[in-house]
Image: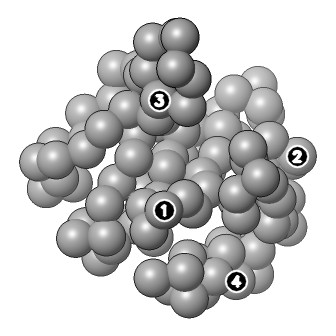
Amino acid sequence: MKAYFDDIVKIMTMENEYVEPGKMMSCEGIRYKGKVFAFYYNDKMIFRLGKNYDISKHGIEEFEYLNPFKNKPPMKGWYEIEVKYSDKWLELAGVSMNVMKNELDK
């Protein structure tokens, strides 16, 4: 599935001049104006969508919040989406980019 993530990066960088590849916690990611909004880790894509985002409107019934730290609670603004929902990854990457864009372009 890494190849599909790479395709998403290519599509998004071609469609928006401010989108570029990047790194998040040593993982391949996608940035908007230097800020990571999505990345690939352990055959999952992780998206920054915000704490109150309703992921179910994309037909996603199973997800986890990003939890990279042993002694801290999960990061509830970041959603880990499994390969079984990979058909939603490109759509979610667009939503995630727009969340970041709205924050940075105020």
Q: Which residue is mark 3?
A: 67
Which amino acid is tagged 2?
A: Gly
How many neighbours does mark 4 have within 10 angstroms: few (below 14), some (14-19), or many (20 or more)?
A: some
Q: Quadrant of residue 3?
A: bottom right
Which amino acid is tagged 4?
A: Lys
Q: CA distance from mark 4 to mark 2?
A: 16 Å
65 vs 54, nearest the viewer: 65
Q: Which residue is mark 2?
A: 34
Which amino acid is tagged 1?
A: Asn
Q: Quadrant of residue 29?
A: bottom right
Which quadrant of the figure contains the N terminus?
A: bottom left
Name the mark on residue 33. none
Q: Is residue 82 left or right of residue 49?
A: left
Asked if the residues shown at circle 1 and circle 4 are in contact, with their CB atoms under 8 angstroms apart, the answer is no
Q: CA distance from mark 1 to mark 3?
A: 13 Å
Q: Which residue is mark 4?
A: 10
Q: Secondary structure at mark 3?
A: loop
How many neighbours does mark 3 have within 10 angstroms: few (below 14), some (14-19), or many (20 or more)?
A: some
- Residue at horizontal 52%, vertical 20%? 70
Which quadrant of the figure contains the C terminus?
A: top right
- Compare marks 1 and 3 and give the one earlier in the sequence: 1
Q: Nearer the viewer, mark 1 or mark 2?
A: 1
| 52 w.r.t. 85: above or below | above
Q: Can residue 39 be seen in this snapshot?
A: yes
- Residue at horizontal 55%, vertical 31%? 68
